[in-house]
Every structure is written in structure tokens, then in C-alpha cells.
Image (cartoon, helix red, strand yellow):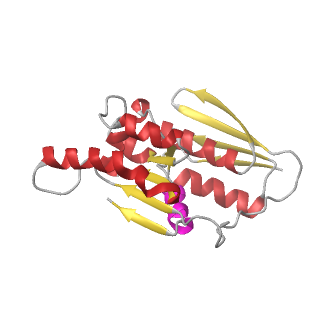
Amino acid sequence: MKKDIDARGLSCPAPVLQTKAAIDSESPVLIEVLVDNEAARQNVSRFLKSQKYQVSEKRNGSDYCISGKREGEAVMQKKAPEISKSQDAKIMVMVTTDRIGHGDDELGAKLMTAFLKTLKEIGRELWRLVFLNNGVKLTVDGAKDLVSLEELEKSGITILVCGTCLDHFKLLEKKKVGETTNMLDIVTSMQLADKVINI
């Protein structure tokens, strides 16, 4: 069975939500999703891969066709959170700004630098960093705190960067760290986290 979805004209997370709804209700072996922006292309492609589809992409002008193929007809089993008492708690830090506090922007930027350098002190419980709104500016080429984020990512911390936000600031092509994500992934991360810290 093949499912076609035309998500052109829609911004994230709508294309991913439409794709998820189709997979949840129909579990197609083949699925093709049309989108017309780079953030949606990355998010739909990554979502299909997370659902065990083999993904290929074709570009036609400003449109992208993302094709997913799953071997066999088995319905995917949804993953349940796997947190037991023996595991470390999961802390998610949501960063919505490129500085901390209000008043003096220079001081706020210095505080953010110190915060990102110190985050590793949380230890194994630090699970995921999510960057939204102005916070995405910390993840792009030329950002002064990029090294700290790269070190955290290399240590195994998942970093998610809002694709809609990157697109809004015209920074999608300049992202240097983390995975481009959407609101569905962010909300799911909040559900799975034991604690969410907002900055």
C-alpha cells in the first residue's frame, strides 16, 4: 500500500504531523511526502527514518519529494518510555534565548557562555538540549559558544534545534550543531523527560 501526502505550503510541524497520522492510521509500506521548504524536508525525512523507513529524496524546483519504503507489512510498535528506577533521570534543558536575563545584553551573553560551559556538571542526567526562538543563534556558524555545544554533543547529549526558528532567522544553512527538529519532537521530549529546565 502506498500513501501520498501533499504538505506543500505548510510549515513545521504540520508536515510531520500529517506523516505521523498517516503512518499511525494506515501503516503504509510506501509513503511519499511533498514539501516546499528545507526545514520540513529535514524533519519529515528524519521522522520517517525514526519509523524504520528507508528514505530517499528528490528535488523538483522548490519542492522536495521524500519517499519512504518499509520492508514487509508489519505494523510498527510504538516505543514506550524506557525509564526504570535503576536508570538516571532525564533532564531536558530548553534554551529560548541567546543570553540570560534582562537588563544588560553584554552581561546576559557572558552568563549564557558560562551556563553552557557549566552544563556538563549536571552529569549523566543531562539528556537533551533543545534550542528555540533566539536560542537557535547559539547553534550556527560563527556563534561564540559553538565549541561548548559541540563538546556536549560529542559526549552523547542530544541537541535539537527548531527548524521553523532557523528558517525564520534565515539560518537553516548555517546550523553547525544538533539535529533540525520540529514541535512534535520537542513536545515528545518534554513528555519523556523527568525534568525540564527552561532558560
Question: Is the residue 25 above or below the residue 123 in the image?
Answer: below
| In-image side of 173 versus 29 (left or right) | left
Q: Position of residue 157 (x, y in %)?
A: 52, 48
Q: Nearer the viewer, residue 72 or 193?
A: 193
- Whether residue 187 appears in this view of the structure is yes
| In-image side of 36 versus 94 (left or right) | right
Q: Nearer the viewer, residue 115 or 143?
A: 115
Question: Is the residue 139 above or below the residue 162 in the image?
Answer: above
Q: Residue at x 14, y 47 (%)?
A: 107
Q: Quadrant of residue 95?
A: bottom left
Q: Residue furthest bottom?
A: 85
Q: Quadrant of the C terminus?
A: bottom left
Q: Position of residue 186 (x, y in %)?
A: 49, 58
Magenta highlight range: 183-192
Q: Residue at x 46, y 38 (%)?
A: 151
Magenta: predominant secondary structure element? helix
Question: Is the residue 75 above or below the residue 70 in the image?
Answer: below
Q: Nearer the viewer, residue 44 or 130?
A: 130
Magenta stretch containing residue 8, yes or no?
A: no
Q: Position of residue 11 (x, y in %)?
A: 46, 49
Q: Position of residue 2 (x, y in %)?
A: 79, 47
- Whether residue 131 appears in this view of the structure is no
Q: How many marks?
A: 0
Q: Residue furthest left?
A: 103
| In-image side of 6 versus 134 (left or right) | right
Q: Residue at x 48, y 62 (%)?
A: 91
